[in-house]
Image (cartoon, coloured by chain):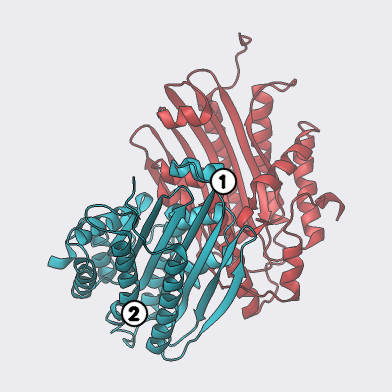
Chain colours: A cyan, B red
Amino acid sequence: MKKPVVSINKTEISEAFKRIQDEICQGIEALDGAGIFIEDLWTRDEGGGGRTRVLSNGDLIEKGGVNFSAVHGPVSEAMNQQLGLDGNEFYATGVSIVLHPHNPFVPIIHMNIRYFEMDTGEYWFGGGIDLTPHYIVPVKAREFHQALKQVCDHHDSSFYPRFKKWADDYFFIPHRNETRGIGGVFYDHLHEGNSLSKQDLFNFSCDLGRSFVKIYTDQVDQRNKPYQENNLDWRNYRRGRYVEFNLVYDRGTTFGLKTGGRTESILMSLPVNASWIYNYQPSTAERDTILLLKKEIDWLDV
Amino acid sequence: MKKPVVSINKTEISEAFKRIQDEICQGIEALDGAGIFIEDLWTRDEGGGGRTRVLSNGDLIEKGGVNFSAVHGPVSEAMNQQLGLDGNEFYATGVSIVLHPHNPFVPIIHMNIRYFEMDTGEYWFGGGIDLTPHYIVPVKAREFHQALKQVCDHHDSSFYPRFKKWADDYFFIPHRNETRGIGGVFYDHLHEGNSLSKQDLFNFSCDLGRSFVKIYTDQVDQRNKPYQENNLDWRNYRRGRYVEFNLVYDRGTTFGLKTGGRTESILMSLPVNASWIYNYQPSTAERDTILLLKKEIDWLDV
């Protein structure tokens, strides 16, 4: 039996997520300095909808999406089977971000916070932030992981080590034997237990979301660094890997595309352009980055 | 009990496929006029290997691959389950082609012929040719389908209508509600029966393979047509759809990537570049093409 505590409900969670979307859009517009988000409101026939916001061709960001959605409706047989549940109605809400910068020396970033519940009473939180530098700079990677650890430690000292490993395993491209980037944190199916209440998990997800703008701001210090054609080629080649991960492995993307999600909102994560060169032979700087696309690097100690 | 007929064996099939790869490479080099194929020989730890040939930056072709492979080895539990068989050793051989031209007014083309057998005695042929024009020209689409019908009719009058429908269903992108292009023919799991012997099916597959160069030659008549920046943008945008199909739905690609196939050979099908624009608004010429990206168009009668 669950304890009869009045805990935060789905409407409050999705309202908080909306505010986080607003804050992040304002923060990214300020950081960019030129680009503005264009909003598309959409509804879903079976229930709910979303606010897709895309910034194109800014000063810093070439293409970026900050999406909010809150959808609900009847549970399909496939969904029950996949989740091992027996529900009739589900509710899912989240904020999802991918930013592709112009400058090859500025990393791609992804953030997602989400909440799911079933009318049977099961619920969970999921989310994460991960960074994909076209060129990995160890000192910046350390700063990134330190910042994530700080957000995590504020809530539970087990979070960072668990969620860092989870990100290594999740943001991995088996057919390339490469991680997508330097990882970050990833968590899923997080529900109350081990002295953490639903409210605690909600607070953690919100804190992670609210940390996003500051964390990315600290990563874009090279935004005005001059670059050459070969740096752009490499950026586009790495963007190809991003496309491979998202279309082949990313659960949100493949599940969304195959279950009738809004395609343009799901695929806002793809870059303006990407390239594939057969048997690409990287030069020295690029090889240094490839050597760091591995699991289990202790980025706090590089 | 199968009839004790001495029929063509796997070695003869793969040798014939190799010769077809050679013929096609020669034919495409002659058609291109400048580019040459670079060959990579590779072997597979569990058995077999292949000859990957890639032409880069030719006069006509920006990136094209003509691959041969013949692989064999122990059957995994997953493969038996997927095939509904109970084999110990499999053998698979085939030729696989994708050509991406420079000029937006020249179509992308794909061809594949393949043969599979299990040590339990089951075997089958599969294959197909399909065309993906960036701009669909109905009269050229009709010529393409007429040529395929002619190859098919030479073997069995039921082939073209069956395999044309199969291509419509296979080369389809559900999340876009679009076909990949104007289809063509596609067949799979074809084994003897209905008065067709194994030799007949082999002969059909070889004829289809040998028709490739002539069929594509007839489709590249616009190779010197001048184009503008917006035509290139549209080409790259359509290439994005090609990437989506191959990475999300194409069985050969997804199965290959997830079962340890040679990644660079599998992904030679991806274009040098591709682009994704949020909520792209096509102009008139592009809209005309989108309207024709539908199943069940009778291309013989357009």
Left-right relation of B278 to B50: right
Type of amino acid under label 1? Ser
Provide the secondary structure element on which disc 2 rests.
Answer: helix
Which comes sooner in the sequence, label 2 or label 1? Answer: 1
- Residue denoted by label 1: A76
- Residue denoted by label 2: A213
Q: Residue visible at 31% across and 82% down?
A: A217
Does residue B257 appear in this view? Answer: yes
Does residue A134 appear in this view? Answer: no
Q: Residue A11 carries which label?
A: none
Q: Dot 2 surroundings within 10 Å: few (below 14), some, or many (20 or more)? A: some
Q: In the image, residue A76 lies at what x, y percent?
A: 56, 46
Question: Is residue B198 depicted above or below B178 in this figure?
Answer: above
Q: In the image, residue B293 lies at what x, y percent?
A: 72, 58
Q: Residue visible at 48% across and 87% down?
A: A35
Q: Which of B86 and B96 is in front in this view?
A: B86
Q: Nearer the viewer, residue B20 or A53?
A: A53
Q: Quadrant of the C terminus of chain B?
A: bottom right
Q: In the image, residue A111 lies at what x, y percent?
A: 37, 68
Left-right relation of A8 to A165: right
Subunit bearing disc 1: A
**CA separation, marks 2 and 1?**
36 Å
| Quarter of the figure with residue B156 | top right
Q: Residue visible at 31% across and 56% down?
A: A178
Left-right relation of B61 to B56: right
Subunit bearing disc 2: A
Residue sitting farthest toward the bottom: A33
Q: Dot 1 surroundings within 10 Å: few (below 14), some, or many (20 or more)? A: some
